[in-house]
Image (cartoon, helix red, strand yellow):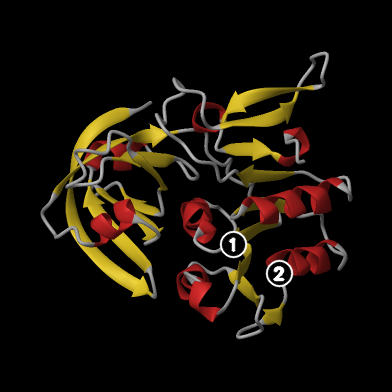
């Protein structure tokens, strides 16, 4: 179900560095959203820019109608969003896309998150009937987000930084490989982050006969499946053995076993 709703900015605070948290009053979408879905946002003050911007839903409070996103300032649109004052109306389209499935109460669930990919999996951890093992990675400590918030949910968190400024020195998939090869029950893996990380996650789990749910990071235009600019390859019963599907409509969450990486 998708709705167009004029939300109202409640708070728009810098978390750290270039990362911000935007809280919106959007009661219709907040009640409907599922973990892993996103909203297509019209940036205030950018009427000359026709295209909306997709943002994963970080958190919601259906009782109050609050919907939260986390974003990083990387260009004109997000810079303008960072300057949005409380009370500003913002047009949202959502919730969009297919999200994550919740783990069962007897599962051993694991989140692998790179950069602000951890925002797209937070609602999954909040609504899970069992605490997650969460692996968070970034280039440096400045790119590690939501470590405290995940721990407050009861999750066990490990971190990796490429420069060694905190936790394991290396990439976050090093931690996943250690976990997969450490014995114990087979984990149920969920992942969101840069595509290079997601490709590594898919190879790690498939090489061990496991599967994962991965939220693919892809540029979107329309957000509703009309323009076909966000297509990705998945395995299919075709002469080529694959087909293109739309990330915004058929994803952004896919099974690792159906993804095609080149």
Question: Is 57 displayed left or right of 81 in the figure?
Answer: right
**Which residue is rendered at x = 74% and y = 53% of the image?**
201
Q: Residue at x 25, y 36 (%)?
A: 28
**Quarter residue 244 falls in:** top right
For the C terminus, the quadrant is top right
Q: Position of residue 199 (x, y in %)?
A: 73, 49
Task: Find numbered disc 1 in the image and state the secondary structure of the residue it sits on.
Answer: strand
Q: Is 88 left or right of 4, judged from the image as shown?
A: left
Q: Does 131 sit above or below residue 1?
A: below
Q: Is residue 201 visible?
A: yes
| Mark 1 surroundings: few (<14), some (14-19) or many (≥20) residues within 10 A | many
> Which residue is depicted at the point 42% across and 41% down?
38
- On the image, the x and y values in percent for residue 157 come to 61, 72
Mark 2 = which residue?
A: 171
Which residue is disc 1 drawn over? Answer: 114
For disc 2, the neighbor class at 10 Å (few under 14, some 14 to 19, many from 20) is: many
Q: Can you tell which quarter of the image residue 215 is in?
A: top right
């Amino acid at each position: 179900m998708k709705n167009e709703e004029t939300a109202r900015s409640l708070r728009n605070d810098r978390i750290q560095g270039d990362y911000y948290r935007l809280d919106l009053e959007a009661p219709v979408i907040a009640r409907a959203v599922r973990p892993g879905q996103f909203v297509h946002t019209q940036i205030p003050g950018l009427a000359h820019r026709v295209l909306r911007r997709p943002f994963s839903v970080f958190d919601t409070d259906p009782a109050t109608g609050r919907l939260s996103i986390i974003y990083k300032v990387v260009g004109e649109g997000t810079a303008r969003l960072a300057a949005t004052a409380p009370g500003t109306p913002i047009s949202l389209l959502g919730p969009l896309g297919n999200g994550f499935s919740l783990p069962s109460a007897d599962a051993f669930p694991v989140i692998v998150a790179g950069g602000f990919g951890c925002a797209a999996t937070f609602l999954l951890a909040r609504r899970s009937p069992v605490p997650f093992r969460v692996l968070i990675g970034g280039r440096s400590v400045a790119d590690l987000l939501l470590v405290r918030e995940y721990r407050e949910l009861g999750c066990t968190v490990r971190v990796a930084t490429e420069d060694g400024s905190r936790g394991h020195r290396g990439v976050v998939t090093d931690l996943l490989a250690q976990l997969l090869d450490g014995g114990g029950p087979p984990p149920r893996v969920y992942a969101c982050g840069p595509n290079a990380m997601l490709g590594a996650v898919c190879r790690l789990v498939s090489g061990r006969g496991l599967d994962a749910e991965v939220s693919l990071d892809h540029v979107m235009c329309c957000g509703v499946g009309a323009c076909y600019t966000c297509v990705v390859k998945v395995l299919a019963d075709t002469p080529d053995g694959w087909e293109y599907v739309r990330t915004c409509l058929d994803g952004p969450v896919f099974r690792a076993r159906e993804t095609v990486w080149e």
